[in-house]
């Protein structure tokens, strides 16, 4: 499911991915395991969340950005 | 991978080669082929939303969705209709027929992916995709293709059987005979030298002759 709504805020699917990153830095496979979402959907969602500035990527692993952290607190 | 015929038509993908790449708008967001790397993928096209044969096929694909998941296979539909049309049709199928469509469906409005995969066959329809199935492996290689005409709905048992056969071949380095189903004997790869042919009959397989030997897995 799209992770960013037209108003630029994360959808419920997007929030599920963001919450999975609350306690650490994870790879897409690890996020898929934690959330139970199919890997293809996690990869697509992370791409959207990164573009919208809610997550940051480093060497294939993802963590919350400052904007992302504010949303899941 | 895909050959231009010189007449503005596009040829078919080739078995064993990388599947043509794409980035597509779908009912579950923007998806790239690379999003499916590491999983098997069944990419299938249908001619149009809100049509009878396609509706029966969508229901049938939904019915094998869990069986596909057990085999680590994702499912991805495609037609040249819009996302709005897909959403309206999917909602209609759920409302009228009680079946939820769990897989994403590509809206290939400009036929970009349809042309890359040779899904448009002008003698069938100049505007719609025919009923294609592409089985793509975890390395994004095309492993099997099925093309059916507009009039004929596909057989889901055959799609599952095909995936079982491909996965069995990969796991055990064997081939599968006609009408094979899981549990049946498989074909041992034929010898490639005279010496191997001589030895083959002594190796304990069920052999009709040196070139046709089978075994149980």
Image (spheres, coloured by chain):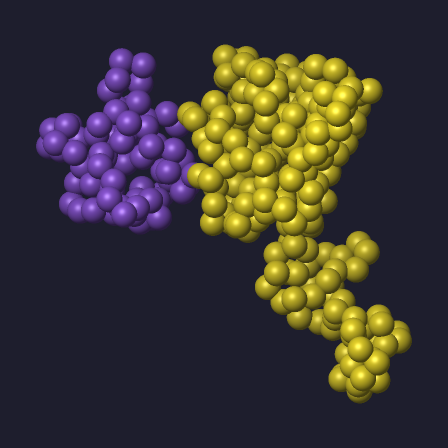
Chain colours: A purple, B yellow
Q: Position of residue B210 (x, y in %)?
A: 86, 77
Quarter of the image that includes the N terminus of chain B: top right
Quarter of the image that includes the C terminus of chain B: bottom right
Residue furthest to the right in view is B209
Query: Front-most of B96 and B85?
Result: B85
- The residue positioned 79% from the left and 60% from the top of the image is B177
Count up the numbered dots.
0
B190 to A36, vertically: above or below: below
Query: Front-most of A1 and A63?
Result: A63
B128 to B213, vertically: above or below: above
Instruction: Quadrant for residue B181, please give it.
Output: bottom right
B217 to B126, vertically: above or below: below
Instruction: Quadrant for residue B169, please give it.
Output: bottom right
The answer to whether residue B164 is seen in the rendering is yes
The answer to whether residue B89 is seen in the rendering is no
Q: Position of residue B104 (x, y in %)?
A: 50, 29
- In the figure, is residue B144 to the left or right of B81? right
- The residue positioned 65% from the left and 66% from the top of the image is B173
- In the figure, is residue B18 to the left or right of B26? right
- In the figure, is residue A23 to the left or right of B110? left
Query: Front-most of A31 and B116?
Result: B116
Q: Position of residue B83 (x, y in %)?
A: 50, 16
- The residue positioned 39% from the left and 27% from the top of the image is A1
Query: Front-most of A17 and B170?
Result: B170
- The residue positioned 78% from the left and 74% from the top of the image is B191
- In the figure, is residue A64 to the left or right of A32? left
Q: Position of residue B30 (x, y in %)?
A: 43, 26
Instruction: Quadrant for residue B8, please give it.
Output: top right
């Amino acid at each position: 499911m799209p992770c960013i709504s037209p108003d630029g805020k994360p959808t419920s699917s997007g929030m599920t991915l963001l919450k999975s990153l609350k306690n650490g830095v994870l790879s897409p496979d690890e996020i898929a395991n934690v959330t139970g979402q199919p890997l293809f959907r996690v990869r697509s969602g992370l791409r959207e969340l990164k573009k919208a500035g809610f997550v940051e990527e480093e060497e294939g692993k993802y963590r919350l950005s400052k904007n992302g952290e504010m949303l899941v607190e | 991978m895909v050959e231009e015929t010189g007449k503005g038509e596009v040829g078919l993908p080739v078995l064993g080669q990388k599947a043509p790449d794409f980035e597509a708008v779908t009912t579950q967001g923007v998806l790239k082929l690379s999003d499916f790397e590491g999983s098997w993928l069944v990419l299938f096209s249908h001619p149009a939303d809100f049509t009878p044969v396609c509706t029966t096929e969508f229901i049938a694909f939904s019915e094998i969705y869990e069986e596909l998941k057990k085999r680590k296979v994702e499912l991805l539909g495609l037609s040249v209709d819009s996302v709005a049309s897909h959403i309206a049709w999917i909602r209609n199928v759920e409302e009228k027929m009680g079946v939820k469509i769990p897989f994403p469906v590509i809206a290939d409005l400009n036929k970009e992916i349809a042309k890359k995969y040779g899904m448009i066959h002008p003698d069938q329809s100049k505007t719609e995709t025919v009923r294609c199935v592409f089985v793509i492996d975890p390395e994004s290689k095309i492993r099997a293709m099925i093309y059916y005409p507009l009039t004929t709905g596909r057989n889901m048992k055959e799609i599952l059987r095909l995936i079982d056969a491909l996965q069995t071949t990969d796991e055990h380095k064997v081939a599968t005979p006609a009408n094979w189903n899981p549990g049946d004997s498989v074909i041992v790869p034929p010898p490639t030298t005279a010496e191997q042919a001589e030895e083959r009959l002594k190796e304990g397989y069920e052999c009709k002759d040196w070139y046709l030997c089978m075994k149980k897995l």
